[in-house]
């Protein structure tokens, strides 16, 4: 059972593994076809989440450098580091329409200022605003 402050499915970089198709494919095998269509280099094994896999993501050769950095510094999240935000969290336009990588700093800021419980309550809405929101200058992404 997931506890309110359980960070098991929140990667140190702020990505929520619990909503990732590679994690959810264990409960919904049809997501495997979606992943293939999106040209993910998916090997068919459901991901247990970044923390459970100790940063050994099937999409990364070796260990995720962000995970290794935070683990080596003894932190749970990147925002706890004196170097936050570092270049590993810099947003990029590349694949922004299919990957949630540009949400990292926003997610981390939400966790830092509102806590894990509030973040987990908002994570679905945050992702919807990112992928389905219409940007309104001065108001941010608005859901229709």
Image (cartoon, helix red, strand yellow):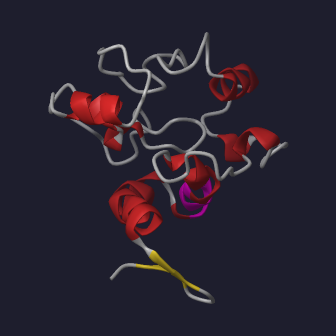
x, y percentage for residue 85?
A: 78, 49
The vertical placement of 66 against 20, above or below, is above
For image coordinates 36% across by 66% down, the residue present is 125
**Vertical comparison of 83 with 132: above or below:** above
Residue extending farthest bottom: 138
Quadrant where the C terminus sits is: bottom left
Which quadrant holds the N terminus?
top left
- Horizontal and vertical percent for residue 71? 66, 23
Which residue is the extreme one toward the top? 62
In terms of depth relative to the viewer, which is nearer, 86 or 44?
44
On the image, the x and y values in percent for residue 106 come to 59, 59
Specify whether 138 is left or right of 52.
right
Q: In this rendering, would 95 be left or right of 42?
A: right
Which residue occupies the foreground of this view, 83 or 140? 140
Compared across the picture, whether 62 is left or right of 135 comes to right
Residue 51 rendering spot, x and y as whole percentages: 48, 24
Image: 124 above or below 92: below
Within the magenta stretch, is there residue 119?
Answer: no
Count of numbered circles on the image:
0
Residue at screen point 68% across, 41% down: 78
Residue depicted at x 38% and y 54%: 120
**Magenta region, residue range:** 107-113
Q: Is residue 74 left or right of residue 114?
A: right
Residue at the outermost right position: 83
Residue at the location (44% across, 21% down)?
41
Camera-nearest residue between 38 and 135: 38
Q: Main secondary structure of the magenta part?
A: helix
Quarter-wise, where is residue 29 in the image? top left
């Amino acid at each position: 059972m997931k506890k309110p402050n359980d960070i098991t499915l929140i990667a140190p970089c702020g990505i929520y593994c619990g909503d990732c198709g590679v994690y959810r494919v264990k409960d919904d095998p049809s997501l495997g076809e979606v992943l293939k269509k999106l040209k993910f280099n998916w090997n068919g094994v459901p991901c247990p989440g970044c923390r459970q896999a100790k940063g050994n993501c099937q999409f990364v050769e070796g260990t995720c450098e962000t995970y290794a950095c935070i683990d080596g510094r003894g932190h749970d999240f990147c925002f706890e580091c004196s170097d936050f935000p570092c270049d590993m969290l810099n947003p990029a336009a590349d694949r922004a329409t299919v990957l949630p990588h540009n949400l990292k700093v926003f997610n981390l800021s939400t966790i830092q200022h509102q806590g894990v419980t509030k973040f987990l309550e908002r994570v679905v809405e945050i992702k919807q605003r990112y992928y389905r929101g219409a940007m309104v200058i001065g108001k941010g992404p608005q859901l229709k």
